Image (cartoon, helix red, strand yellow):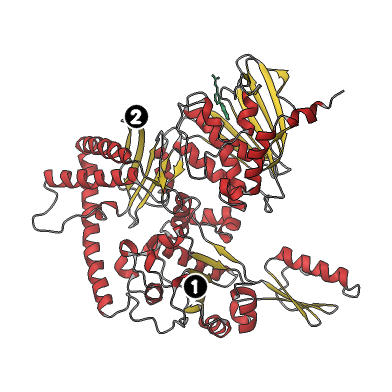
């Protein structure tokens, strides 16, 4: 008898070619094969269920992280069609799961994404999975198919009956360990995205479960973006009830919510087809233009601007503004460095027109709110004027423009930013070691004294008076805030090097807050890094090893133990003192200052041997929330956040 499985595989030559392309160059399809890429696999599968929900057929999505690190995504949509495709002689389900970009062919009415990382199709997830199993409930039956590294094991098969009215799709996959070296899913990373999706799509309920530890969350937000804005401003005080705009203009569904609060930061997050457009684009421009024009008109018409006083600029209308803009675009064009900038020009006019009309209406109906908003903007204009004066003063003294580099900076000799890096180092003693240990050709060192100012709580003019911050601004030499120009940065890498203790992590967070609020393009362009100094030195006779965490320490000790039978184990938890066990010496570094220049170079600064973490903005909304919670005025949410997320904060990967 013929081996049906082999015969079956033989028909899949074209499919194999497609899958191989994905397996050979996974990063081309999912961005990278690190933690980020791993989590994108789940997002990709969930996106398909969200599409089904947006088409009006599903309202429930369940994501489960299973004990074996596989993930299951279930929805109650129509179920992927299973009928046999007349040309291909295969089930539609099989085609969706194995042919690149086949998903979209079946349904043209939803807002699919082209370009960017999402929307590559579930077949990409299939190609990058050791195995994937899909179950479809349709027409009172349950259909099933399984794949190994994207290749179907058998044709689609009916495996059960289901209740007539029950429909849906359930996909379970185990990412390929040969491709994803880091294959552990983080609940928080997935949950953050599910929460965001639930805010952006108010009719859907998304539940996420972690079978590894029983953790689970259910997200459903009746108020949609209104609740999203409230969540973002949980630790700030809103000045009025949230402005909410919803509707469709020129076939573009638009949803916007915003409010002014008691902070000085602008926090507008924009989305296209549920994707965070970090770099903004036409929808955001349309919103800003309409906001400035409508508020200016309103202020003028109602006599709220005093004759001869300050003019209000666009920036003034956005100080202390938190808002979310979400649009659905049928054929989005994504541009920019990270392909997260919307290019469609028709979207600008759609958003601009809609916001112009509806905001004017809102202001007429809520004159009290209108007055409060204009007063807030006038205060912003006054502060801007004060900051401008402070900046002019500082400029005259050459403190900010890089002409006069800070005295503490040990600059490098090469001047091409591409090849230069600056270490911003906690404390003078570590700064001293770093200066001696560095390669002075391309590495600059800027030591900082103590804690820098918390920019989350300060107005711009105060920020500009702070010496440590002035030193950072002038060393980088690219201006600040609205005037910041990342292209002028004097270094291609900016590396934050702080101690591996509580103070060090606080200083690192203060620095990240500063870069996030005032030099965000450095983060967008991937120029900010976090140095990773070792936690332990392990010495055995003449050999020295460094361990960067407890696991690594234990592994090194195990290796040494199995090499030399004489060195019995006895690894102490929290060995903060030098611990000697039969010739093995373990010391824990208390701070960077304890390392001599050679050690610092070898472990933390030598590009050949060091590890540095690149800081990226996976979710700008999440980053904003973290900074505001950690650095803002409200104490109680901060305490709660730290208690709940102690682990997460330590590994702050904004
Ligand atoms: C195209 C057509 C139909 C359903 C789907 C796609 C669909 C895809 C996914 C992916 C995950 N969950 C899904 N649910 C549905 C149905 C066409 C019809 O029934 O007429």
User: 17 above or below 159?
Assistant: below
Q: Position of residue 597 (x, y in %)?
A: 61, 83
Mark 1 CB lies closer than 8 A to ligand 1: no
Q: Position of residue 378 (x, y in %)?
A: 20, 55
User: 267 above or below 77?
Assistant: below
- Give the mark nearer the N terminus: 2 vs 1: 2
Does residue 459 appear in the picture of this structure?
no
Q: Residue furthest right?
A: 565
Q: Quadrant of the N terminus?
A: top right
- Determine whether, in the image, residue 96 is placed left or right of residue 526: right
Point out which mark residue 65 bears: none
The residue that disc 2 covers is 251
Q: Position of residue 118 (x, y in %)?
A: 52, 41
Front-most of 644 and 119?
A: 119
> Which type of secondary structure does the marked residue at label 2 adopt?
loop
Residue at (56% x, 44% y) in the render: 191
Q: CA distance from mark 2 to mark 1?
A: 48 Å
Res 653 quadrant in image: bottom right
Mark 2 CB lies closer than 8 A to ligand 1: no
**Callout 1 crowding tier (Cα within 10 Å): few <14, some 14–19, many ≥20:** some
The residue that disc 1 covers is 419
Does residue 229 appear in the picture of this structure?
yes
> Which type of secondary structure does the marked residue at label 1 adopt?
helix
Eye-nearest disc, 2 or 1: 1
Residue at (41% x, 42% y) in the render: 271
Front-most of 70 and 650?
A: 70
Front-most of 628 and 175?
A: 175
């Amino acid at each position: 008898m013929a081996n049906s499985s082999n015969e079956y595989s033989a028909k899949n030559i074209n499919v194999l070619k497609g899958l191989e392309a994905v397996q050979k160059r996974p990063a081309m399809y999912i961005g990278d094969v690190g933690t980020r890429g791993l989590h994108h696999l789940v997002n990709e599968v969930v996106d398909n269920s969200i599409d089904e929900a947006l088409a009006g057929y599903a309202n429930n999505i369940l994501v489960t992280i299973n004990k074996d690190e596989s993930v299951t995504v279930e929805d109650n949509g129509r179920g992927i069609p299973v009928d046999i495709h007349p040309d291909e002689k295969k089930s539609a389900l099989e085609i969706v799961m194995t042919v690149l970009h086949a998903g979209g062919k079946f349904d043209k009415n939803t807002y699919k994404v082209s370009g960017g990382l999402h929307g590559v199709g579930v077949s990409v997830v299939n190609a990058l999975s050791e195995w994937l199993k899909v179950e479809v409930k349709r027409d009172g039956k349950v259909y099933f198919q399984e794949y190994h590294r994207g290749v179907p094991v058998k044709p689609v098969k009916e495996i059960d009956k289901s209740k007539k009215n029950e429909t849906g799709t359930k996909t379970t996959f185990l990412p390929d360990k040969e491709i994803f070296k880091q294959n552990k899913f983080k609940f928080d990373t997935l949950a953050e995205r599910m929460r965001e999706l639930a805010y952006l799509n108010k009719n859907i309920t998304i539940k996420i479960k972690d079978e590894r530890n029983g953790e689970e969350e259910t997200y459903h937000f009746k108020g949609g973006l209104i609740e999203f804005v409230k969540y973002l401003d949980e630790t700030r005080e809103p000045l009025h009830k949230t402005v909410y705009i919803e509707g469709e203009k020129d076939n573009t569904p638009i949803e916007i919510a915003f409010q002014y609060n008691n902070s000085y930061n602008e926090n507008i997050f924009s989305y296209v087809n549920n994707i965070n457009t970090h770099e903004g684009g036409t929808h955001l421009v349309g919103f800003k233009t309409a906001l400035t024009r409508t508020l200016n008109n309103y202020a003028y018409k109602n006599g709220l601007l005093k004759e001869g006083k300050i003019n209000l600029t666009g920036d003034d209308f956005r100080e202390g503004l938190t808002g979310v803009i979400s649009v659905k675009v049928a054929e989005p064009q994504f541009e920019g460095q990270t392909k997260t900038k919307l290019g469609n020009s028709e979207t600008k006019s759609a958003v601009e027109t809609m916001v112009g009309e509806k905001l004017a209406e809102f202001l007429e109906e809520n004159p009290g709110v209108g007055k409060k908003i204009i007063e807030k903007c006038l205060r912003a204009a006054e502060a801007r004027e004060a900051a401008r004066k402070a900046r002019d003063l500082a400029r005259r003294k050459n403190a900010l423009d890089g002409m006069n580099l800070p005295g503490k900076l040990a600059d490098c000799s090469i001047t091409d930013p591409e090849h230069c890096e600056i270490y911003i180092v906690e404390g003078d003693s570590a700064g001293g070691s770093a200066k001696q240990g560095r390669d002075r050709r391309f590495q600059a060192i800027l030591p900082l004294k103590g804690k820098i100012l918390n920019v989350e709580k300060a107005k711009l003019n105060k920020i500009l008076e702070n010496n440590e911050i002035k030193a950072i601004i002038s060393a980088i030499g690219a201006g600040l805030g609205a005037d910041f120009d990342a292209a002028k940065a004097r270094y291609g890498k900016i590396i934050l090097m702080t101690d591996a203790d509580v103070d060090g992590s606080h200083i690192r967070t203060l620095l990240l807050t500063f870069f996030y609020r005032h030099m965000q393009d450095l983060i967008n362009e991937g120029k900010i890094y976090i140095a990773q100094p070792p936690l332990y030195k392990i010495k055995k006779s003449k050999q020295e090893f460094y361990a960067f965490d407890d696991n690594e320490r234990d592994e090194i000790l195990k290796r040494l133990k199995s090499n030399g039978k004489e060195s019995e184990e006895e690894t102490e938890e929290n060995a903060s003192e030098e611990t000697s066990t039969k010739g093995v010496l373990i010391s824990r570094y208390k701070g960077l200052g304890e390392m001599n220049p050679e050690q610092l170079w070898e472990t933390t600064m030598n590009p050949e041997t060091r590890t540095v973490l690149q800081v990226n903005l996976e979710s700008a909304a999440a980053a904003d929330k973290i900074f505001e919670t950690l650095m803002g005025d409200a104490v109680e949410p901060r305490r709660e956040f730290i208690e709940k997320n102690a682990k997460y904060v330590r590994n702050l990967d904004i």
